[in-house]
Image (cartoon, coloured by chain):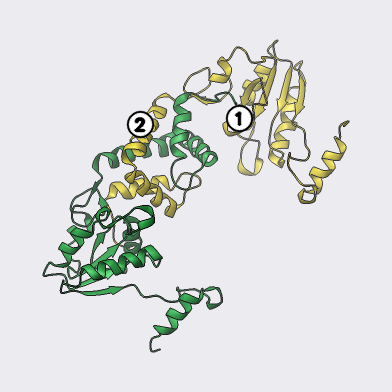
Chain colours: A green, B yellow
């Protein structure tokens, strides 16, 4: 058992940093030392930013996005296309679509996918509010931007069934060759899908 | 230019997290989302731990270690061997030696190595206090636990010259085959050093 090197406050900081995704015990130690060395220009601002975020971050009551305002920046943006509702699994996916700048519609964050094996049923997701929003007169299209995994596709089918009554067009993201992708390295499923969905050149 | 997804407070938190070693822009976003999701059991304690550390962390006036007390936990530990002074490049190296539980002496943190190309000269390091400590009557051995790099070895030679007047034995870490290491993968320098320093079996 190695002796304690530093005071309990530092050990505790390291342990908490190690629980961030992407950091392990070793890199958490490096991060803690880096913080201490960059006290004025990193540690103080980070402490402040965490405190700020802790105080202000809320979940958007409309779409489930995380922001410092409710309704969130996306929902409050009146220049967005209110007729398109983009369904995503989680906030990270919403942010990814926004970074791509690809979508101008509004979002709906499910908070996960149906996963019977993990005990995640429809009641654990924001599906009821999705059905309500899909019935709003302004909404004409629901885009299921869910992961192309078994759970994602199961969820997509479940939602499609639920929305049969709503007068909306239901679409999903295209499958195909990623930009920059090489055919030789792609799996058969993607290649078949890309060939089936070929478009005029 | 993608639109802002979340409020400026969240963007700022992500930018600051991205400046930690081991985290990039993408993993910083993941970390921020993880923090928001684990608000009570991670984000609040981490904010508190950072504030605590910010308030209490000091550099030990004797050895240069980072701790919440001065003199630091190591220097204040009277069970340690006061005759051995272990010279390390930085606090991370001190912690590494302590984790190994290998040393029972006291430390001296240089704060870097001599590096003329980067403009790091003797005055930028804690070398003067090292010379003072080496002249204390209690100290009989100075162990140069510096990295086996060009800069580390240059610094070791420089310190050895400076301490010629002090009545202390100057030693360095052994070179050799790392525990668990395979000869086939080792560089020639290490293998030669290991052969030269062979010990009776």
Question: Which of these two is toward me, B196 or B139?
Answer: B196
Q: Is residue A48 visible?
A: no
Crowding at mark 1 (Cα within 10 Å: few <14, some 14-19, many 20+): some
Q: Give the total number of marks visible in the rendering.
A: 2
Residue A54 horizontal/vertical position (percent): 28, 40
Residue at image location 81% in from the left, 48% down from the top: B188
Extreme bottom residue here? A200
Q: Which type of secondary structure does the marked residue at label 2 adopt?
A: helix
Tell me which label, 1 or 2, sits earlier in the chain: 2
Extreme top residue here? B137
Q: Are marks 1 and 2 on the same chain?
A: yes
Vertical arrangement, residue B61 with respect to residue A10, above or below = above
Vertical arrangement, residue A170 with respect to residue A7, above or below = below
Q: Which residue in the structure is indicated by mark 1?
A: B99
Q: Quadrant of residue A39?
A: top left
Residue B70 horizontal/vertical position (percent): 50, 18
Crowding at mark 2 (Cα within 10 Å: few <14, some 14-19, many 20+): some
Question: Which of these two is toward me, B57 or A173?
Answer: A173
Extreme left residue here? A137
Q: Which residue in the structure is indicated by mark 2?
A: B48
User: Could you tell me if the residues under marks 1 and 2 are in contact, i.e. CB atoms within 8 Å?
Assistant: no
Residue A106 horizontal/vertical position (percent): 22, 64
Vertical arrangement, residue B147 with respect to residue A188, above or below = above
């Amino acid at each position: 058992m190695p002796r304690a090197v530093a005071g309990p406050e530092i050990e505790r900081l390291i342990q908490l940093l190690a629980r961030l995704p992407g950091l392990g015990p070793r890199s958490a130690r490096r991060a803690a030392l880096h913080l201490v060395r960059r006290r004025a220009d990193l540690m103080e601002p980070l402490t402040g930013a965490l405190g700020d975020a802790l105080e202000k971050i809320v979940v958007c009551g409309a779409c489930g996005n995380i922001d410092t305002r409710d309704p969130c920046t996306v929902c409050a943006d009146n220049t967005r296309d209110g007729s398109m509702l983009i369904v995503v699994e989680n906030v990270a996916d919403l942010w990814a679509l926004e970074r791509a700048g690809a979508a101008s519609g509004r979002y709906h964050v499910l908070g996960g996918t149906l996963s019977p094996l993990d005990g995640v049923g429809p009641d654990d997701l924001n599906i009821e509010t999705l059905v309500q929003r899909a019935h709003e007169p302004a909404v004409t299209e629901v885009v299921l931007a869910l992961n192309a995994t078994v759970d994602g596709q199961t969820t997509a089918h479940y939602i499609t069934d639920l929305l049969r009554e709503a007068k909306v067009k239901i679409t999903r993201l295209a499958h195909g060759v990623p930009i920059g992708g090489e055919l030789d390295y792609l799996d058969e499923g993607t290649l078949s899908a890309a060939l089936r969905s070929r478009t005029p050149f």
